[in-house]
Image: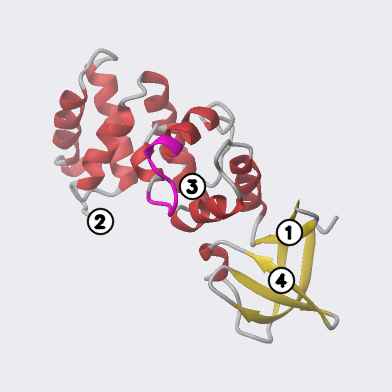
Amino acid sequence: MIAKLSGLLDSTGTDWLVIDVSGVGYQVFASGRTLSQLPTIGQKLSLKIEALVRNEQTHLFGFTDETERAWFRLLLGIQGVGAKVALALLTALSPEELHRAILTQDKTWITRAEGVGPKLAGRIVAELKDKVADFSLGLSSSESASAFEISSISHGMGEAISALTNLGYRRPDAVQAIAKASQKLGPGASIEDLIRQGLNLLAQPNTGGVAHG
Protein backbone atom coordinates (compact mmCIF):
# COMPACT_ATOMS: atom_id res chain seq x y z
CA MET A 1 0.00 0.00 0.00
CA ILE A 2 1.30 3.45 -0.90
CA ALA A 3 2.07 5.50 2.23
CA LYS A 4 4.20 8.29 0.76
CA LEU A 5 4.96 9.82 -2.63
CA SER A 6 7.92 12.03 -3.49
CA GLY A 7 8.50 13.53 -6.89
CA LEU A 8 7.80 16.60 -9.01
CA LEU A 9 4.54 18.53 -9.09
CA ASP A 10 3.08 17.94 -12.55
CA SER A 11 -0.31 19.67 -12.39
CA THR A 12 -3.13 20.68 -10.05
CA GLY A 13 -6.93 21.03 -10.03
CA THR A 14 -9.63 22.20 -7.66
CA ASP A 15 -9.22 19.21 -5.33
CA TRP A 16 -6.36 17.20 -6.81
CA LEU A 17 -2.77 17.24 -7.97
CA VAL A 18 -0.55 14.98 -10.03
CA ILE A 19 2.88 13.93 -8.76
CA ASP A 20 5.43 12.78 -11.30
CA VAL A 21 7.44 9.98 -9.70
CA SER A 22 10.19 8.83 -12.08
CA GLY A 23 7.96 9.40 -15.09
CA VAL A 24 4.79 7.92 -13.58
CA GLY A 25 1.99 10.38 -12.76
CA TYR A 26 -0.07 9.72 -9.64
CA GLN A 27 -3.32 11.64 -9.19
CA VAL A 28 -3.76 12.56 -5.54
CA PHE A 29 -6.81 14.21 -3.97
CA ALA A 30 -6.14 16.79 -1.26
CA SER A 31 -7.72 19.45 0.93
CA GLY A 32 -7.64 23.08 -0.08
CA ARG A 33 -5.22 23.67 2.79
CA THR A 34 -2.75 21.14 1.41
CA LEU A 35 -3.14 22.43 -2.17
CA SER A 36 -2.40 25.97 -0.99
CA GLN A 37 0.96 24.80 0.38
CA LEU A 38 2.18 23.16 -2.81
CA PRO A 39 5.31 24.40 -4.61
CA THR A 40 5.22 25.66 -8.18
CA ILE A 41 4.80 23.25 -11.10
CA GLY A 42 7.97 21.29 -11.72
CA GLN A 43 9.25 21.62 -8.16
CA LYS A 44 9.90 18.75 -5.76
CA LEU A 45 7.34 17.77 -3.14
CA SER A 46 6.57 14.92 -0.79
CA LEU A 47 3.16 13.96 0.59
CA LYS A 48 1.85 11.50 3.14
CA ILE A 49 -0.60 9.22 1.35
CA GLU A 50 -3.80 7.50 2.41
CA ALA A 51 -5.05 4.96 -0.14
CA LEU A 52 -8.74 4.04 -0.22
CA VAL A 53 -10.22 1.29 -2.38
CA ARG A 54 -13.75 1.99 -3.58
CA ASN A 55 -15.60 -0.05 -6.22
CA GLU A 56 -12.38 -1.82 -7.18
CA GLN A 57 -10.67 1.54 -7.78
CA THR A 58 -7.86 2.90 -5.64
CA HIS A 59 -7.97 6.60 -4.80
CA LEU A 60 -4.99 8.37 -3.26
CA PHE A 61 -5.32 11.22 -0.76
CA GLY A 62 -2.33 13.40 0.07
CA PHE A 63 -1.37 15.36 3.18
CA THR A 64 1.51 17.65 4.01
CA ASP A 65 1.82 16.31 7.54
CA GLU A 66 0.84 13.37 9.70
CA THR A 67 -1.62 15.39 11.78
CA GLU A 68 -3.88 16.13 8.82
CA ARG A 69 -3.78 12.48 7.75
CA ALA A 70 -4.68 11.37 11.29
CA TRP A 71 -7.72 13.66 11.23
CA PHE A 72 -8.73 12.33 7.81
CA ARG A 73 -8.72 8.79 9.18
CA LEU A 74 -10.73 9.81 12.25
CA LEU A 75 -13.34 11.62 10.20
CA LEU A 76 -13.83 8.68 7.85
CA GLY A 77 -14.89 6.59 10.83
CA ILE A 78 -18.02 8.70 11.32
CA GLN A 79 -21.25 7.69 9.63
CA GLY A 80 -22.09 10.15 6.88
CA VAL A 81 -18.52 11.39 6.44
CA GLY A 82 -16.90 10.21 3.23
CA ALA A 83 -13.61 11.28 1.71
CA LYS A 84 -15.15 14.34 0.05
CA VAL A 85 -16.67 15.65 3.29
CA ALA A 86 -13.51 14.86 5.25
CA LEU A 87 -11.46 16.93 2.80
CA ALA A 88 -14.05 19.72 2.99
CA LEU A 89 -13.67 19.78 6.77
CA LEU A 90 -9.88 19.90 6.51
CA THR A 91 -10.21 22.69 3.94
CA ALA A 92 -12.50 24.86 6.07
CA LEU A 93 -10.76 24.18 9.39
CA SER A 94 -7.18 23.59 10.36
CA PRO A 95 -6.54 20.54 12.56
CA GLU A 96 -6.14 22.91 15.51
CA GLU A 97 -9.48 24.63 14.81
CA LEU A 98 -11.24 21.31 14.33
CA HIS A 99 -9.78 19.98 17.57
CA ARG A 100 -10.85 23.06 19.51
CA ALA A 101 -14.34 23.04 18.02
CA ILE A 102 -14.88 19.42 19.05
CA LEU A 103 -13.56 19.91 22.58
CA THR A 104 -15.78 22.95 23.07
CA GLN A 105 -18.81 21.29 21.45
CA ASP A 106 -19.03 24.10 18.87
CA LYS A 107 -21.17 22.58 16.13
CA THR A 108 -21.63 25.95 14.40
CA TRP A 109 -17.91 26.20 13.73
CA ILE A 110 -17.88 22.76 12.10
CA THR A 111 -20.77 23.63 9.76
CA ARG A 112 -18.42 26.05 8.01
CA ALA A 113 -17.31 23.06 5.94
CA GLU A 114 -19.14 22.50 2.66
CA GLY A 115 -21.64 19.65 2.89
CA VAL A 116 -21.75 19.62 6.70
CA GLY A 117 -25.11 20.53 8.21
CA PRO A 118 -26.09 20.86 11.89
CA LYS A 119 -27.08 17.19 12.23
CA LEU A 120 -23.80 15.86 10.86
CA ALA A 121 -21.83 18.44 12.83
CA GLY A 122 -23.53 17.21 16.01
CA ARG A 123 -22.60 13.62 15.18
CA ILE A 124 -18.97 14.60 14.53
CA VAL A 125 -18.74 16.41 17.86
CA ALA A 126 -20.43 13.60 19.80
CA GLU A 127 -18.37 10.77 18.32
CA LEU A 128 -14.98 12.47 18.35
CA LYS A 129 -14.99 14.31 21.67
CA ASP A 130 -13.54 11.41 23.67
CA LYS A 131 -11.32 10.21 20.83
CA VAL A 132 -9.46 13.52 20.46
CA ALA A 133 -9.14 14.28 24.17
CA ASP A 134 -5.48 13.29 24.17
CA PHE A 135 -4.54 15.05 20.92
CA SER A 136 -2.19 18.01 21.28
CA LEU A 137 -2.34 19.00 17.57
CA GLY A 138 -0.29 22.14 18.02
CA LEU A 139 -2.51 23.85 20.59
CA SER A 140 -0.72 26.10 23.01
CA SER A 141 -0.88 24.99 26.63
CA SER A 142 -3.25 27.82 27.57
CA GLU A 143 -5.61 27.15 24.65
CA SER A 144 -5.61 23.42 25.33
CA ALA A 145 -6.29 23.93 29.03
CA SER A 146 -9.15 26.34 28.31
CA ALA A 147 -10.71 23.93 25.84
CA PHE A 148 -10.55 21.04 28.30
CA GLU A 149 -12.08 23.19 31.05
CA ILE A 150 -15.02 24.14 28.86
CA SER A 151 -15.68 20.66 27.52
CA SER A 152 -15.69 19.18 31.01
CA ILE A 153 -18.23 21.65 32.38
CA SER A 154 -21.07 21.82 29.90
CA HIS A 155 -22.03 20.78 26.41
CA GLY A 156 -23.57 24.23 25.95
CA MET A 157 -20.30 26.11 26.23
CA GLY A 158 -19.86 25.98 22.48
CA GLU A 159 -22.90 28.22 22.07
CA ALA A 160 -21.35 30.88 24.29
CA ILE A 161 -18.09 30.71 22.39
CA SER A 162 -19.91 31.00 19.06
CA ALA A 163 -21.77 34.06 20.33
CA LEU A 164 -18.51 35.82 21.19
CA THR A 165 -16.83 34.93 17.90
CA ASN A 166 -19.93 36.17 16.04
CA LEU A 167 -19.43 39.49 17.81
CA GLY A 168 -15.96 39.69 16.29
CA TYR A 169 -13.70 38.34 19.02
CA ARG A 170 -10.88 36.00 18.08
CA ARG A 171 -11.74 32.38 18.79
CA PRO A 172 -8.81 31.66 21.18
CA ASP A 173 -9.79 34.74 23.22
CA ALA A 174 -13.43 33.63 23.30
CA VAL A 175 -12.45 30.14 24.47
CA GLN A 176 -10.31 31.55 27.26
CA ALA A 177 -12.96 34.05 28.35
CA ILE A 178 -15.71 31.43 28.56
CA ALA A 179 -13.41 29.09 30.49
CA LYS A 180 -12.76 31.81 33.06
CA ALA A 181 -16.44 32.78 33.14
CA SER A 182 -17.50 29.19 33.78
CA GLN A 183 -15.03 28.90 36.64
CA LYS A 184 -16.34 32.08 38.25
CA LEU A 185 -20.06 31.41 37.75
CA GLY A 186 -20.09 27.67 38.29
CA PRO A 187 -21.62 24.79 36.30
CA GLY A 188 -25.19 26.01 36.82
CA ALA A 189 -24.68 29.27 34.94
CA SER A 190 -26.88 29.95 31.93
CA ILE A 191 -25.47 30.58 28.48
CA GLU A 192 -26.61 34.21 28.72
CA ASP A 193 -24.73 34.70 31.99
CA LEU A 194 -21.61 33.11 30.55
CA ILE A 195 -21.74 35.40 27.51
CA ARG A 196 -22.23 38.47 29.72
CA GLN A 197 -19.37 37.48 32.01
CA GLY A 198 -17.20 36.58 29.03
CA LEU A 199 -17.76 40.03 27.52
CA ASN A 200 -16.78 41.65 30.80
CA LEU A 201 -13.55 39.67 30.87
CA LEU A 202 -12.76 40.46 27.26
CA ALA A 203 -13.22 44.16 27.97
CA GLN A 204 -10.47 44.07 30.59
CA PRO A 205 -7.10 45.16 29.12
CA ASN A 206 -5.14 42.54 31.07
CA THR A 207 -7.04 39.66 29.46
CA GLY A 208 -5.60 40.36 26.04
CA GLY A 209 -9.05 39.63 24.60
CA VAL A 210 -10.16 43.01 23.33
CA ALA A 211 -8.88 42.45 19.81
CA HIS A 212 -11.51 41.81 17.20
CA GLY A 213 -10.88 39.55 14.22
The amino acid at mark 1 is: Ile
Q: Is residue 209 left or right of residue 35?
A: left
Separation of residues labelled 4 and 1 (CA atoms) = 11 Å
> Is 49 within the magenta?
no
The amino acid at mark 4 is: Gln
Number of the front mark, 4 or 1: 4
Image-quadrant location for residue 79: top right
Q: Nearer the viewer, residue 152 or 91?
A: 91
Between discs 4 and 1, the one toward the N terminus: 4
Between discs 2 and 3, the one toward the N terminus: 3
Image quarter in which the N terminus is found: bottom right
Between discs 1 and 2, the one toward the N terminus: 1
Q: Is residue 165 left or right of residue 203?
A: right
Do the CB atoms of the residues marked 4 and 2 lie less than 8 Å apart? no
| Disc marking residue 96 | 3
Question: Vertical placement of 7 versus 92: above or below?
Answer: below
Local crowd size for mark 1, using a 10 Å CA cut-off: few (<14), some (14–19), many (≥20)? many
Q: Secondary structure at mark 1?
A: strand
Q: Is residue 208 visible?
A: no
Q: Secondary structure at mark 3?
A: helix
Question: Vertical placement of 178 versus 24: above or below?
Answer: above
On the image, the x and y values in percent for residue 102 come to: 45, 35
Q: Secondary structure at mark 4?
A: strand
Residue pictured at 78% horizontal, 59% vertical: 57
Specify start and end residues of the magenta stretch as a single range: 112-120
Residue pictured at 47% horizontal, 44% vertical: 98
What residue is pinned by disc 2? 213
Local crowd size for mark 4, using a 10 Å CA cut-off: few (<14), some (14–19), many (≥20)? some
Local crowd size for mark 2, using a 10 Å CA cut-off: few (<14), some (14–19), many (≥20)? few
The amino acid at mark 2 is: Gly
